């Protein structure tokens, strides 16, 4: 399963910003957003994988119609439904998209997905946090980078998870970050801590020397 665009990226001293059980019922109506997830009617049909040759290697690709649908859902989700939309990814082996959204109050967004999908397969799954909430937390942590550096907590990456699980903090000292950051932001802050070593730049290639 491959993720599509998860957000902004920052590396090294900057940052990197990046993204379950499944109950699926085709075309199920709802008034306040289906809890547990659902899938579009296009999921009733099987589709053949598409491939491209690159450097002699055969790789699966996302069909153009599905890629276009995913782009529309992501753009509109971020612009119009930021309180519901959490993220999106492509499941290439099954030729389908997976959209994560907060079910509460998502009926309008669910309707948009259903109509935008046309005959493509789009699976909708529940998320704990929407992109608007995670962006707020993400920006708050980024704004506090100097503070955490002064506290001796070295944060290497920060990225909102595309599945809406939380904001992922990559740090060299997971245990210390897990102890100090929730104490600072509150235990309800949707922060996920992962081990991450320092980002090192790639060495510049040195051209071979040719002696006469």
Image (cartoon, rainbow, N blue to C red):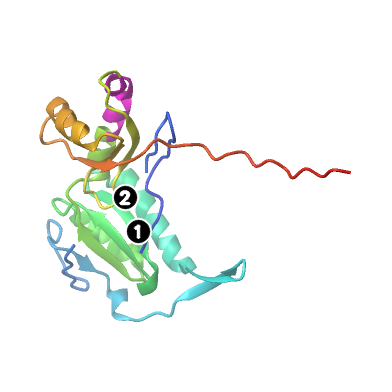
Please state the horizontal and vertical placement of residue 61, each as a whole percent of the image: 48, 68
- Residue under numbered circle 1: 89
Magenta residues, start to end: 138-149
- Look at the image and tell me in which quarter the C terminus lies: top right
Q: Callout 1 environment at 10 Å: few (<14), some (14 to 19), or many (20+)? A: many
On whether residue 79 falls in the magenta region, the answer is: no
Answer yes or no: is residue 119 visible.
no
C-alpha separation, residue under disc 1 versus residue under disc 2:
13 Å
Q: Are marks 1 and 2 in contact (CB under 8 Å)?
A: no
- Write the residue at 18% across / 72% down: 25
| Mark earlier in primary sequence (1, 2) | 2
Please state the horizontal and vertical placement of residue 24, each as a whole percent of the image: 19, 71
Q: Position of 104 compared to 150: left or right?
A: left
Residue nearest the viewer, comparing 137 with 44: 137
Please state the horizontal and vertical placement of residue 117, each as a whole percent of the image: 34, 66
- Write the residue at 62% across / 38% down: 204
Which label belongs to residue 60?
Answer: none
- Residue under numbered circle 2: 77
Residue nearest the viewer, comparing 61 with 41: 61
Q: Position of 24 compared to 170: left or right?
A: left
> Which secondary structure type mostly characterizes the magenta part of the structure?
helix
Answer yes or no: is residue 88 visible.
yes
201 over 62 or under it: above or below: above
- Write the residue at 32% across / 51% down: 19
Please state the horizontal and vertical placement of residue 56, each as a whole percent of the image: 61, 71
């Amino acid at each position: 399963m491959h993720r599509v665009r998860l957000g902004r990226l920052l590396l090294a001293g900057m940052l990197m910003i990046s993204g379950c059980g499944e109950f699926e019922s085709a075309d199920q109506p709802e008034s306040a957003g289906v809890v547990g997830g659902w899938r579009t009617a296009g999921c009733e049909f099987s589709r053949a994988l598409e491939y491209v040759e690159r450097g002699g290697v055969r790789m699966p690709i996302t069909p153009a119609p599905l890629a276009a649908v995913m782009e529309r859902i992501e753009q509109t989700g971020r612009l119009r439904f930021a309180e519901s939309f959490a993220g999106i990814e492509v499941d290439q082996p099954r030729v389908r998209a997976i959209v994560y959204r907060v079910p509460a109050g998502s009926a309008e967004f669910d309707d948009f997905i259903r109509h935008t999908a046309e005959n493509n397969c789009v699976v909708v799954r529940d998320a704990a946090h929407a992109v608007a909430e995670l962006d707020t937390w993400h920006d708050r942590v980024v704004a506090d980078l100097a503070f955490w550096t002064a506290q001796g907590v070295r944060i290497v990456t920060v990225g909102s998870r595309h599945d809406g699980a939380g904001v992922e903090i990559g740090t060299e000292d997971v245990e210390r970050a897990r102890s100090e950051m929730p104490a600072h932001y509150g235990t309800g802050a949707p922060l996920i801590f992962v081990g991450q070593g320092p980002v090192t730049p790639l060495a510049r290639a040195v051209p071979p020397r040719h002696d006469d």
